[in-house]
Structures are given as structure tokens and as C-alpha cells.
Image (cartoon, helix red, strand yellow):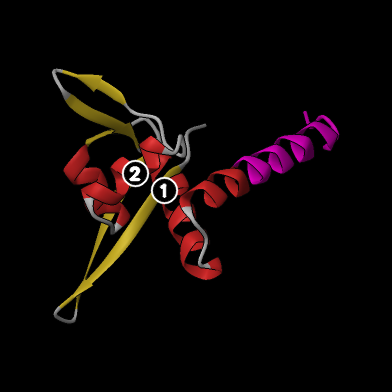
Amino acid sequence: MPTIHYREIVYNGSNEAEIIDEQCTFDLNHFAQVCGQSPEWILQLIEYDILSATVQSQQYHFLGKDVIRARRAYRLQRDFDASLSAVAVMLDLIDEVHQLRRQLRPNQS
């Protein structure tokens, strides 16, 4: 079952929600907007191997599931005043912990 994420935007007192499917694709500018960051910052995440993107016709394309990773990277950078190199290591460790926890869970039928 696919996971559906959303973000809520509050602008001038009105709420707006955007549904983000894991398999939905975004170009660089829309992805940056969804993440609440600049396109330059997103490109830095690619440079540090925090995010991967497909390139078609000289344009970056991202999946909806990458939104979570980009937002997590921002929170780690902000909360710990961490460099992007440190954020990359932290995210790899978080991913490894999640993978190990999935392996330890008993099989559910």
C-alpha cells in the first residue's frame, strides 16, 4: 500500500493542503517549494549524496518519497547546526536503524 503524505500551508490566514504521493514526480523548483527550501539547497543535498535525482533533458526529477528525506535533512541541519556532511552520515545511520528494526520485527501475516 503506498504511503501518502501531505503538507499544510497557511498563507494569509487560509489553510491549503497538498497531497504528495510517494511515486509522484517533481521538477527541481516544485520539489524545493514542497520542501520549503531553495533550489540551491536541494542541489547541495544532491552534491552530498543526501538525495538522488534522475536527470532528463537537463532537468532534475524527484520522487515524492524524497520529500521526507529532504525535510529530515533540514531538521537535522537546523537542530544540530550540522554540516551537510554530518547530515549525510546521520541520515545513513537513521536509515540503517530503520532497516534493522524492520528485520527484527516478527513476520506479520
Position above or below: 76 against 43: below
Q: Is residue 101 magenta?
A: yes
Label 2–label 1 contact, CB within 8 A: no
- Residues 59 and 47: in front is 47
Q: What element carries label 2?
A: helix
Residue at (25, 66) in percent of width and height:
9
Magenta stretch bounds: 92-109
Q: Does the magenta stretch include residue 106?
A: yes
Q: Is the magenta stretch mostly helix, strand or loop?
A: helix
Position above or below: 108 against 71: above
Task: Name the residue type under label 1.
Answer: Ala
> Which percent across, then down, holds residue 6?
36, 53
- Residues 109 and 36: in front is 36
Q: Tell me which corner region of the image, top left, top right, bottom left or bottom right, holds residue 66.
A: top left
* Circle on res. 44: 2
Q: Tell me which corner region of the image, top left, top right, bottom left or bottom right, holds residue 23.
A: top left
The C terminus: image quadrant: top right
Q: What distance separates the C-alpha of mark 2 from that of mark 1? A: 11 Å
Density class for disc 2 (Cα within 10 Å; few <14, some 14-19, many ≥20) is few
Task: Name the residue type under label 2.
Answer: Gln
Q: Name the residue under label 1.
A: 70
Give the mark nearest the N terminus, 2 or 1: 2
Position above or below: 9 against 73: below
